[in-house]
Amino acid sequence: MPSGAVAVGAVRRAPVVPDWRTALAELQLHSRVRWDESLKRLNTWRIGGAADCVVDVQSLDDLAQLLPFIREQRVSWAVIGKGSNLLVPDEGWRGLVLHLGKGFKGWAPLEAPRTVRVGAALADVTFAQRCIEPGWGGMEFLVGVPGTIGGAVAMNAGAHGGESVDFLREVWWLDMGGNLRHAPAEAIEFRYRFSELNAHNGVVVTHATFELRESQPPEVRKQVDACLRFREEKQPRNQPNCGSVFKNPEGGHAARLIEVSGLKGAVRGGMQISPLHANFIVNRGEGTAADALALIEQAQERVFRDHGIRLELEVQHLKRLPFETLVPPPASSSPVS
Ligand SMILES: Cc1cc2nc3c(=O)[nH]c(=O)nc-3n(C[C@H](O)[C@H](O)[C@H](O)COP(=O)(O)OP(=O)(O)OC[C@H]3O[C@@H](n4cnc5c(N)ncnc54)[C@H](O)[C@@H]3O)c2cc1C
């Protein structure tokens, strides 16, 4: 193994110095820049190789410099939250990962009742816990979602019959020109586990406003506890996973289809379709992205063969995130002066 090479699952690759490295240094960012950085600790599956570069973005100013830089230099890029719905290839990823940090963790209650503005890097769990004391109801489900608010908006995260868009009032994001834009939630397209405001569309969500439902602290706490109990009983808690691998097809449950196809508990290398919940693939220790992909393919083929249904991935494959984004931001947004 050449000196400085990185071991990545079964794959090893020597670090390559990207031709934009010097130009990035000239930006004089205040954020930490990590080169040839393993992404294993930045995703909840704990799999995958290294990215050329990870920037722990600390401020809006830094982000506003980085996005035009990415566009001008034609750098492959992605923004990640807690990587709780992310598949990182074993061979790593040639590009720049934006990982929002401290400057994006704000929590600011507004004058309007039960309304709060939060940063995109705030943990969903923290959000849910902070709603208990004031007795704000509705988003208790976030206590079981180990992602960030940015990820919850981008994926329209939801559970137990609710989803993020139900309580979302306004969103702010930076476009690839580094311009801060915002729009009310109703002007943005949201569907089941989909939002127009995903990095796929060349936007980085920076903060959002939510209006919660009137409730009482004991009631909110009760709902939070019920959500946690549900997770403990129905989902694998102690093995790294990415939550639901597939979206539920209309009118059905991916887990049920996989189970009926006889794949619950199926193993490939270090990964297993959870014996507890067939829409979860767990890492048993030494799992790789290749193992996960083999199980994904097997489940898709079997379910199609047995039920005629093509399961669609919910987990986001890093390889499919933008190379260079030319998609314009949603037409209904306004620039923030
Ligand atoms: C144990 C477990 C349980 C889960 N349960 C649920 C559940 O009940 N409901 C549910 O919906 N999901 C669930 N998930 C999946 C996951 O937690 C959610 O999709 C979450 O919203 C992803 O947030 P993240 O910050 O980790 O995003 P990441 O996984 O880091 O990224 C996911 C996608 O969001 C994009 N993205 C992230 N941040 C931003 C941003 N600031 N701007 C633009 N795009 C961004 C990324 O580019 C990527 O496309 C679960 C996962 C696990 C591990």
Image (spheres, rainbow, N blue to C red):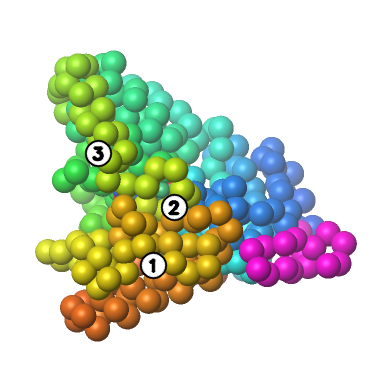
The circle on residue 230 is: 3
Which quadrant of the structure image shows residue 6? bottom right
Vertical comparison of 156 with 89: above or below: above
Res. 334 visible in picture: no
User: Count of labels shown?
Assistant: 3
Label 2: which residue?
241
- Percent x, y for residue 221? 24, 22
Most frequent secondary structure within the magenta stretch:
loop
Which residue type does callout 2 highlight? Asn
Which residue type does callout 3 highlight? Phe
Q: What residue span does the magenta drawing correspond to?
A: 1-21
Q: Nearer the viewer, residue 3 or 235?
A: 235
The residue mark sitting in front, 1 or 3, is 1
Query: Does residue 164 appear left or right of residue 82 in this picture?
Result: left
Label 1: which residue?
266
Closer to the chain start, of discs 2 and 1, is: 2
Q: Residue at x 44, y 56 (%)?
A: 282
The circle on residue 250 is: none
Q: Secondary structure at mark 2?
A: loop
Which residue type does callout 1 highlight? Ala
Q: Secondary structure at mark 3?
A: helix
